[in-house]
Amino acid sequence: MKKLAILLVGLILLSSLVFAGKNVTLKGSDTLLILGQRWAEIYMKENPGTVVQVTGGGSGVGIAALINGTTDIAQASRPMKDKEKDKMLEKRGIGPEEIPVALDGITVYVNEKNKVEKLTFAQLKGIFQAKIKNWKEIGGQDATIVLYGRENSSGTHVFFKENVLNNEDYAVRVQPLPGTAAIVNAIAKDEDGIGYGGVAYAKGVKEVLVAKDEKSDYFLPTMENIVSGKYPISRYLFWYTAGSPKGDIDKLVNWILSPEGQKIVEEVGYFPLPVEQENKKEGESAK
């Protein structure tokens, strides 16, 4: 009985040590999921005792979790909406802090066997609203276009809708898939498929050159084209926190914005922030 009591005390002490560890939770964007996981993996190796938990679900899911106070950081591939900021202020008594963490270009994917090399915004809009239904209408094979997209909780879904479809609705034929990896996997197997998502996921598919209109130049989502803003579907990727980050959250934020953290951005397949953006954060931290 005495041994059992000692064992129980030991277990209680051990569990208290585990739960006393530093925990930071990240939730949201599936675009940012692979980058967030990579950051977490390396950060935890360099900071024993700190646990960084990363889950996806879409930007809207992450933002809702931040509003409800169930995550420390919301990962988002779109800016927070004013109504979301107001809701957070009303519910938690504090507004969000927006932290750009990387650059991305929403990439248009087709199957590697597809003949189509380039598309304008007007053509993309026609395709994803099912007004252009056959690849032969835009220089491809005689086959029905199969549309793949993201769920409406996705920041990429929202960004593409606002910037390419002029905030008009997608066709009902667009098949919503749970994450960019699922879109890429589907298109890699479907010669007639087309979809969109973060540039880091473009493996085993063909990236299409994109132009704002027929009079504009066509560009691929390379680092040079995204940093310069030439690629027409360039965007920032964000972290949101409840007010200015503090303690362990601030330490993590400063690390991912450091040269080491930004190098990981590039290794994963996204693009590091412009140097002036990193310097701005460093200057704010020094105050």
Image (tube, rainbow, N blue to C red):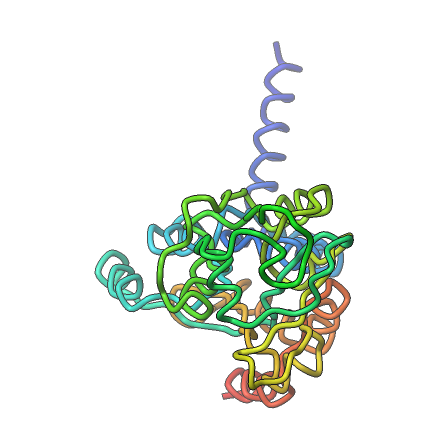
Look at the picture and state if 274 lies above or below 253: below
Residue at the (70%, 56%) spot, across then down: 38
Q: How many marks?
A: 0
| Closest to the observer, 127 or 174 | 127
Foreground pick, 138 / 12 = 138
Q: Position of residue 19 (x, y in %)?
A: 55, 42
Residue lying at the far left of the rendered structure? 90
Coordinates of residue 283 in the picture (x, y in percent): 55, 89
In this view, 251 is above or below 195 = below
Give percent across and percent down for residue 62: 45, 53
Which quadrant: the N terminus? top right
Up-down relation of residue 34 to residue 208 (above or below)? above
Q: Please give the name of the residue rendered at 67% of the width and 81% of the height, measured from the top-left corner.
A: 225
Q: Residue at x 66, y 69 (%)?
A: 118
Q: Is residue 194 visible?
A: yes
Can the viewer see residue 73? no
Measuring from the top left, give residue 16's x and y in whole percent: 56, 38
Q: Residue drawn 55% across and 83% down?
A: 281
Q: Is residue 71 left or right of residue 38?
A: left
The part of the image, by quadrant, that contains residue 235 is bottom right
User: Left of 21 or right of it: where is 204?
Assistant: right
The extreme top residue here reads: 1
